Amino acid sequence: MDAAEKRVEQELVRHHPSADVTLIEAAYRFAREAHESQKRVSGEPYVTHPIAVAQILAELGLDVAAVQAALLHDIPEDTDFSLGDVEERFGAEVARLVDGVTKLSKFGSARTHEEQQAENIRKMFLAMAEDIRVVLIKLADRLHNMRTLGGLPLEKQQRIAHQTAEIYAPLAERLGIWQIKWELEDLSFKALQPVAYRTLAAQLETHRRERESYVQRSMDVLRGALEAAGIKAEISG
């Protein structure tokens, strides 16, 4: 088991102390077998993607079935194994989650961009009504794809970033998953407006250093005042 797999298990057990990690290990093995010969555009083994998606979900506190489904979510669509193989090995609940993610990935052929986006949103909300975990897996899938967008052609990067900004980031906001919402927006902005992004990032870095210096000076003053008053305290900022 590599370090990434261990982190998934650690996060899962942190949120669910009684979780059966052997179920996760079985999903790892099957994912590695199914994606054995596949590579990502970056050249990394394809299995690094489902493992990263599983880690995002484990950090969010999702259950064993959802983490298993994250590890297996691309198998029916991208490998020689079927949804039936997933169900046979991991049961109906995990297979249903994987099938839900697969259906969300199959966007329709609407005539206009607006119709297509409306159809995508409709699918998302239908999936939410059936099992919110399906949408959370899809959000985690999109987040990792956005984190690793750089290897794709520029036109495809921008198309994915537009869709992310218009559908996935607002959906994360509606679900109250603020950290994912902010990161999706940040990554979309970086892909769509790289010059403006770099300029803003440089400005924020300058202000960050100024803020850190101000906070440190304030802490030093406060610490000195507390010591002079004979008050023991720990200060952090």
Image: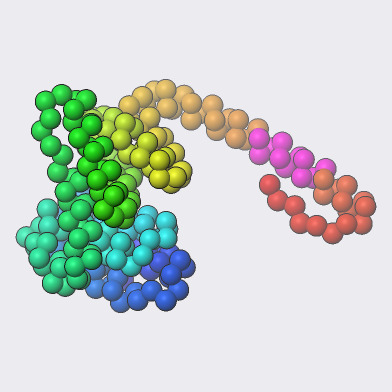
Specify whether residue 125 is in view: yes
Q: Does the segment drawn in magenta span residue 159? A: no
The vertical placement of 37 against 221, above or below, is below
Residue 116: quarter of image: top left
Q: In the image as oriented, which residue stretches furthest toward the left? A: 80
Left or right for 205, reference 6: right
What secondary structure prevails in the magenta region?
A: helix
User: Which quarter shows the N terminus?
Assistant: bottom left
Q: Where does residue 21 sit, x and y in percent of width and height?
A: 34, 74
Along the line of sight, the residue nearer the viewer: 137 or 28: 137
Instruction: Tell me the quarter of the picture where residue 193 sits.
Output: top left
Examine the rendered structure and indicate whether residue 12 appears above or below residue 141. Answer: below
- The x and y percentages for residue 199 are 46, 24
**How are the colours assigned in the image?**
rainbow
Q: Residue at x 30, y 61 (%)?
A: 66
Q: What percent of the width, then of the height, locates residue 141? A: 28, 49
Does residue 92 appear left or right of residue 215 in this picture? left
**Which residue lies most toward the right here?**
229
**What residue lies at 15% left-to-right and 68% top-to-bottom?**
87
Q: Where is 22 relative to 46, above or below?
A: below
Range covered by the magenta-colored residues: 211-221
- The answer to whether residue 85 is left or right of residue 56 is left
Residue at x 17% of width, y 56% of height: 99
The image quarter containing residue 145 is top left
Coordinates of residue 2 in the picture (x, y in percent): 33, 67
Residue at 27% across / 58% down in the picture?
70
